[in-house]
Image (cartoon, grey):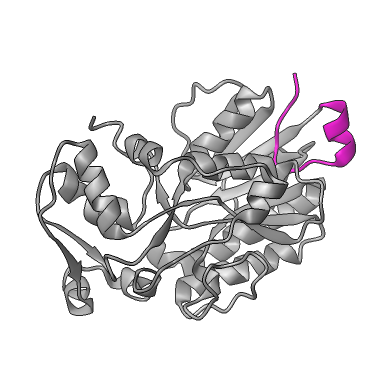
């Protein structure tokens, strides 16, 4: 049976022997990319500090710590590709992410596997062009954006080929995002809804299923590595997304409120304040490269919302 891991040499692709190691710690898309790879017949190894139950075809879950490069290397032996989909605690990104990316890079180098990193748009900062292009220079203005930028630079400098898949804010079942944390609970409970930023500013939303499709498609990319791709996304202002979500639940939202910075601070949203700029102006993403070179298209906004609400419909 073919084994799947996240690094592939062109020759191994041709002979149909793929080994993918999926290094995840509950990052968005982590379940869906391993599911896609397993359903294609690849042998997937999912590693995480805390491994739960797993009934997915061709997927093995093994407890491991990505900061331990030697242990991770043993698990990745024979791998074609390593997917780095790990998630650190939000306020600890500047400290906890670096040992994770360093261990993952060293493991990929040790086994000669290609490296696919799941990232986001924070590294572009607030002064980037609109729409954001994947070839734009990174110019972060936040601690978390700086952490993401450093992570990609370390992956880029690896002795193995690397790609970064950058997504916007997530929608989808189980996705953890500003929308799911701030607005969604109030929508579900039919309470007054508040969010952050300009609630009428158009914003890109990435579906966890489309994130997984982009990760898997990127592992097969035959062009030049050392670059990024944007996940094809859909667009809606926060107000539009809130009202469409409520409508799918048969509810009507009379009005919405945008939290001010003092309100955010009082509510304990300290880590969100530096990222508020993402919602203060339109956020558009050019994903034409992923659509053309990886053949990935964005799902409809309605499908994204329905999947987000699948436990409540």
Residue 210 position, x and y percent, is 52, 42
Question: Which quarter of the rendered picture does the C terminus lie within?
Answer: top left
Q: Taken as a whole, is the magenta stretch helix, strand or loop?
A: loop
Question: Which quarter of the rendered picture does the N terminus lie within?
Answer: top right
Q: How many marks?
A: 0
Q: Residue at x 52, y 71 (%)?
A: 130
Q: Is residue 105 magenta?
A: no
Residue 137 position, x and y percent, is 64, 75
Instruction: Say whether residue 240 is left or right of residue 277.
Output: left
Q: Residue at x 60, y 51 (%)?
A: 66
Q: Residue at x 23, y 32 (%)?
A: 312
Residue extent of the magenta highlight: 1-16
Residue 286 position, x and y percent, is 58, 61
Residue 39 position, x and y percent, is 61, 23
Q: Is residue 26 visible?
A: no
- Looking at the image, which is closer to me, 228 or 90? 228
Q: From this view, report whether residue 32 is shown above or below residue 170.
A: above
Q: From this view, report whether residue 44 is shown above or below residue 186.
A: above
Q: From this view, report whether residue 123 is shown above or below residue 29.
A: below
């Amino acid at each position: 049976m073919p084994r799947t891991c996240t690094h592939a040499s062109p020759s191994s692709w041709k002979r149909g022997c793929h080994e993918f190691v999926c290094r995840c710690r509950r990052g968005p898309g982590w379940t869906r990319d391993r599911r896609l790879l397993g359903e294609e017949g690849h042998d997937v190894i999912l590693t995480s500090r805390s491994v739960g139950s797993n009934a997915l075809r061709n997927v093995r879950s093994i407890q491991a710590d990505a900061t331990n490069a030697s242990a991770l290397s043993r698990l990745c032996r024979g791998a074609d590709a390593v997917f780095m989909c790990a998630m650190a605690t939000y306020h600890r990104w500047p400290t906890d992410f670096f040992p994770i990316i360093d261990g993952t890079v060293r493991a990929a180098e040790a086994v000669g596997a290609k490296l696919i990193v799941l990232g986001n748009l924070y590294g572009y900062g607030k002064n980037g062009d609109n729409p954001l292009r994947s070839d734009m220079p990174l110019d972060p203005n936040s601690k978390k954006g700086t952490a993401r930028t450093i992570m990609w630079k370390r992956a880029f400098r690896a002795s193995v080929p690397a790609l970064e898949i950058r997504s916007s804010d997530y929608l989808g079942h189980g996705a953890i995002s500003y929308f799911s944390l701030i607005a969604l609970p109030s929508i579900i409970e039919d309470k007054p809804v508040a969010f952050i930023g300009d609630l009428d500013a158009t914003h890109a939303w990435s579906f966890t299923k489309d994130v997984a499709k982009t990760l898997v498609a990127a592992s097969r990319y035959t062009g030049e590595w050392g670059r990024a791709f944007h996940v094809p996304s859909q667009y809606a202002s926060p107000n539009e997304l809130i009202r469409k979500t409520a409508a799918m639940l048969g509810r009507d939202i009379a009005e919405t409120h945008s939290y001010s910075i003092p309100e955010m601070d009082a509510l304990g949203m300290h880590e969100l304040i530096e990222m508020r700029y993402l919602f203060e102006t339109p956020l558009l993403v050019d994903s034409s490269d992923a659509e053309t070179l990886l053949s990935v298209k964005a799902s409809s906004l309605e499908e994204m919302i329905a999947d987000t609400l699948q436990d409540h419909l």
